Image: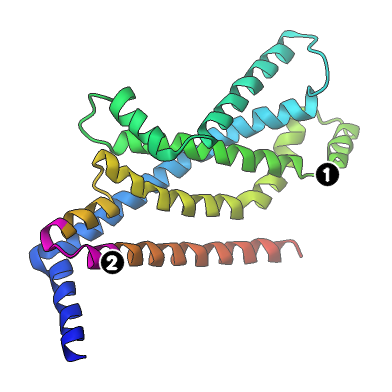
Amino acid sequence: MQEFFSGIGDSLYKLLIVENRWEMLLEGLGITLFIALISTILGTVLGFLVGIVRSTYDLQLKGKKCRKFSDYLLKALDVVARIYVTVIRGTPVMVQIMIMFFVVFATAQDGVFPAILTFGINSGAYVAEIMRSGIMSIDKGQFEASRSIGFDYKRTMIYIILPQAIKNILPALGNEFIVLLKETSVACYVSVQELTFTGNMIASRTFDIFTSLIAVAAIYLVVVLVISYLLKLLERRLHNSDH
């Protein structure tokens, strides 16, 4: 038993203390969080716009004939949005990041920007469906009520529908951030020195892949638990505000 704990202590010493490798892990975690945060912002903005296009088409034009230029424009945007969502959700994020790094940005020296762009675009497709479902979940009677008091579609969306929809989808957006945080691990395949890449690099020096991967998994777990706790507090606060 003493030899067992001695072996664990030796592994942790090599993992964290030698060459100040804990600083490498901390730097890798920082890059992971940075990529996840910026990608989430990009994906939220992109998904918001795509979700608005798709829900507007469903509410105003679906099943009807196009009568003016704005109708044709909306229909064209909806087709583009559907293709975007279908393609992005139907292909692996690993393939997407490889295409982005090795094809689109073939001359890039750093994979951080291609990674952010890839994860942002990927997240946008899922956020778009979250946004669309949030808008479509609002009772249609509220559209009719707003029209009865003189609101046009734009003012109805801005002042009545979107505030309720965004409030309803905030927990889902938080979960999307958690998923995106874990997906950033595939960025190691394009040599982005995030947490997983750093863990593999340390393992190549210590020749102890088990301890390195367990440490990386533990760090991800702690971060996810902290974010999940914050999301629960947010959900509780939103729930209390309804009363």
> Which label is found at residue 139?
1
Quadrant placement of the C terminus: bottom right
Q: Main secondary structure of the magenta part?
A: helix
Span of residues in magenta: 204-215
**Are the two marked residues, 1 and 2, in contact with CB atoms closer than 8 angstroms?**
no
Q: Where's residue 157, x and y in %? A: 73, 35
Q: Secondary structure at mark 1?
A: loop
Residue farthest to the bottom, as pictured? 2
Q: Is residue 55 magenta?
A: no
Report the residue at 39% width, 39% height from top: 94
Q: Around disc 2, counting alpha carbons within 10 Å, would you say few (fewer than 14), some (14 to 19), or many (20 or more)?
A: some
**Kind of residue at disc 2:** Ala
Left or right side of 114 for 57: right
Q: Where's residue 37, x and y in %? A: 41, 47
* Number of numbered discs: 2
Left or right side of 175 for 241: right
Q: Quadrant of residue 67?
A: top right
Vertical arrangement, residue 166 with respect to residue 106, above or below = below
Residue farthest to the right, as pictured? 148
Q: Quadrant of residue 175?
A: bottom right
Q: Nearer the viewer, residue 130 or 161?
A: 130
Q: Secondary structure at mark 2?
A: helix
Q: Earlier in the sequence, mark 1 or mark 2?
A: 1
Q: Quadrant of residue 66?
A: top right
**Kind of residue at disc 1:** Asp
